[in-house]
């Protein structure tokens, strides 16, 4: 049995945040595929035994069962001694950007992509609204990355690993990087991290059955 | 000048999270009203000098200028020695629920209320979508609070203070607490915290001019 077991599926940008962290740190981990598209996370068993929040990722490490990617990343930075803060100022800055990601970027981007790519909703008032919010958050990120190499320190941290979670699905989201050149340049730096792979090459369940 | 200055307005549940923390800890704080409804947070000055994320709350403490309510609450728990974790397990549990709040509850609830109450959008596909997500998060919370007094420990913590941020605007959101009895009972306990007031009685800018 591996040191870490990650409940995940290849389509989840939130699970990817944890998978990328584990891979990039060279941790001994294995995936436990979750049948999200057939409703596994919404079952009573999953809610009771795995995660009351009804979500992936969940990380199992010994007796611990952790959820919420930002909380898991914080835990792993401590356990694995990589991508964490070195000062209290960095600790605050990392947490601030992880919260921004959860509150303003991933919340809208993940949902927008889900409707657009998986439910094939086409353009609707809902995708228009979510897309507007997503682009607002991306504009903030692009401005923040102007003149910076990484999000919250002079090196990559768990803030970078959190924020990039959905952005390698750019084709499915329909992003045009000419709009956000500083984000695009930063994503190239993320791709150079040790152990980087695209989410579809790092977790099980891709492609979905027809 | 007070020890803490909070950029805020009475209508913001996110600013309220910080105001409630400061008030309940008996901190020496003052409000700096932000003219959100006339666009102050979207100005270049605000982005450059106050918060690149274009949001309230921002807390000024000495030379520090902090943003993102979850990050500010974590900072204040350390500075003021109240509502913080006592163990690493509690620290993880608190962070997990603050992230859940930002990712799944406040992100949809705040936006739903804004459209419904302030823009008077009426029922639209967008409010239907956001409302569905909000109710999904409330159902998770209600289940979690069944048999518990507080969210993440045997006493109130910054996780409680974060999650309650928008829930005292229940009339504006149109919440029926019969649906969520465990959340409702918990909110009564929050109201008993020292220094508790409704957001409209704690921060400036209410009511809005006609």
Image (cartoon, coloured by chain):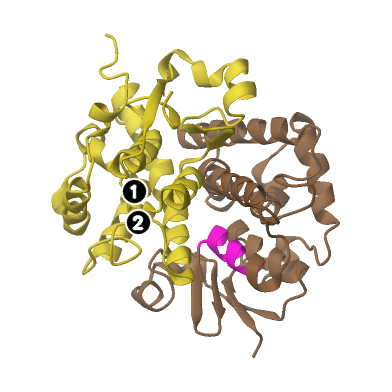
Chain colours: A brown, B yellow
Occupied quadrant, residue B209:
top left
Q: Chain ID for label 1?
A: B
Residue found farthest to the top: B210
A119 sits left or right of B170 in the view: right
Looking at the rendering, in which quadrant would you find the N terminus of chain B? top left
For the record, the magenta segment spans A68-76
Q: Nearer the viewer, residue A73 or A182?
A: A73
Where is mark 2, residue-wise?
B157
Occupied quadrant, residue A181:
top right
Q: Is residue B195 above or below residue B1?
A: below
Asked if the stretch drawn in magenta spans residue A126, the answer is: no
Between the C-alphas of marks 2 and 1, the distance is 7 Å
Q: Nearer the viewer, residue B80 or A158?
A: B80
Residue found farthest to the right: A192
Evaluate whether residue A79 shows in this view.
yes
Q: Chain ID for label 2?
A: B
A210 sits left or right of B15 in the view: right
Evaluate whether residue A204 shows in this view.
no
């Amino acid at each position: 049995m591996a040191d870490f077991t990650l409940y995940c599926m290849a389509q989840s940008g939130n699970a990817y945040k944890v998978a990328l962290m584990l891979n990039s740190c060279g941790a001994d981990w294995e995936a436990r595929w979750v049948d999200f598209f057939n409703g596994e996370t919404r079952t009573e068993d999953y809610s009771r035994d795995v995660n009351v929040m009804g979500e992936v990722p969940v990380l199992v490490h010994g007796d611990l069962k952790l959820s919420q990617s930002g909380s898991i990343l914080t835990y792993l930075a401590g356990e694995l001694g990589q991508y964490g803060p070195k000062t209290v100022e960095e600790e605050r800055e990392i947490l601030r950007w992880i919260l921004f990601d959860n509150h303003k970027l991933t919340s809208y981007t993940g949902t927008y992509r889900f409707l657009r790519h998986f439910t094939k909703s086409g353009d609707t008032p809902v995708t228009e609204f979510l897309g507007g919010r997503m682009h607002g958050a991306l504009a903030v990120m692009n401005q923040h990355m102007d003149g910076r190499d990484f999000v919250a320190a002079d090196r990559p941290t768990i803030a970078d690993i959190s924020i990039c979670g959905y952005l390698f699905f750019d084709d499915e989201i329909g992003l045009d990087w000419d709009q956000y050149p500083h984000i695009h340049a930063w994503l190239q730096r993320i791709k150079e991290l040790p152990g980087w792979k695209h989410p579809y090459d790092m977790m099980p369940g891709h492609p979905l059955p027809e």
